[in-house]
Amino acid sequence: MSTPILRLENVQKSFGSKQVLKGVDIEVQKGESLVILGGSGSGKSVMLKNALGLMTPTAGKIFFDGQDVTKATGRTREKMRARIGMLFQSGALFDSLTVWENVGFRLLQVDKMRRKDAKEQAIETLKKVRLGPDVADLYPAEISGGMQKRVSLARSIISKPDLIFFDEPTTGLDPITADAINDLILEQVRGLGAAAVSITHDMASARKIADNIAMLFEGKIIWHGPANIIDNSGNDHVDQFVHGRADGPIQPAI
Ligand SMILES: Nc1ncnc2c1ncn2[C@@H]1O[C@H](COP(=O)(O)OP(=O)(O)OP(=O)(O)O)[C@@H](O)[C@H]1O
């Protein structure tokens, strides 16, 4: 098998005496779509932040395309970031920037591209998520939540990344809009040949976008396998999660 685009090796993360990640091992191959499941507070976001370099693990290693980036800084970190797209849970658009300025943010701020060229590229990318040039000059507050997700998706793919993180991409959307977002994610990931790591509670979304599924429980990956066997995982925790039952080994987070 070729070098994985991302590999977490025994990643641990503690905050004071609280150990959130207790030794996470996971690999993501180039072009693979991996979905991470886990109850509220199981450490999914912390895992993602460590993988992105927004947090440093207490112990363990993170490899990006074969390179140890656990403690990377400066140029190495920047080069890695340039190859990663990120769709945040809330969309995280800048309210004070127009739609096209949000989409082209990296081109303007990092690549220092001329505004005219950046706008052209932003409009091209908006087209890929089925948004017309008419929305380019609007502000995020002037478009719907579903459209905001599309704009965020456009922003995450504009630099043709090798790896895209999706944090709850369908949260807060009606099932039809959510499914349209799933289609767009699949289309873009397949079209770019990028790998995707998605965090979601939405099983319909997981089934649709995942090649493989991993489940995080109490700071460890307790199951990892192909998405098409998720209903016959043979794991009580996965079963409970997949069927949304309050009774079982996972305690509700209330
Ligand atoms: N910066 C931090 N300082 C201290 N504790 C933190 C910090 N970030 C996260 N935690 C703790 O780590 C645990 C896991 O949080 P995390 O946000 O990763 O959960 P999650 O699985 O993403 O949950 P959800 O599905 O509800 O978003 C929580 O108990 C949280 O309080």
Image: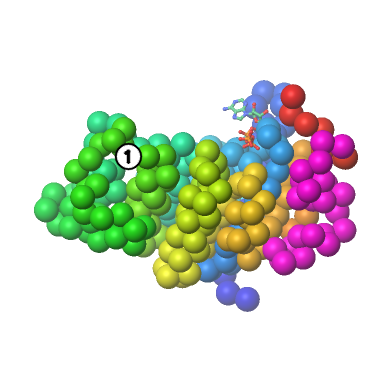
User: Which residue is painted at 78% across and 48% down in the image?
Assistant: 243
Q: Please identify the quarter of the rendering in which residue 98 is found.
A: top left
User: Which residue is painted at 40% across and 60% down in the image?
Assistant: 161
Between 177 and 8, the residue placed more toward the observer is 177
Task: Name the amino acid, label 1.
Answer: Ile
The magenta stretch is: 225-247
- The x, y position of residue 143, in whole percent, is 32, 39
Between 136 and 39, the residue placed more toward the observer is 136
- The x, y position of residue 100, in whole percent, is 24, 47
- The x, y position of residue 235, in whole percent, is 86, 54
253 shown above or below 37: above
The residue at which mark 1 appears reads as: 143
Which quadrant of the frame does ligand 1 lie within?
top right
Between 127 and 66, the residue placed more toward the observer is 127
User: Which residue is painted at 35% across and 53% down in the image?
Assistant: 154
The C terminus is located in which quarter? top right
Q: Is residue 4 left or right of residue 73?
A: right
User: Which residue is painted at 66% across and 63% down in the image?
Assistant: 212
| Residue 253 visible from this viewpoint | yes
Give neighbour class at mark 1: few <14, some 14-19, many 20+ (Cα, 10 Å): few
The answer as to whether callout 1 falls within 8 Å of ligand 1 is no
Is residue 226 found inside the magenta-colored segment of the image?
A: yes
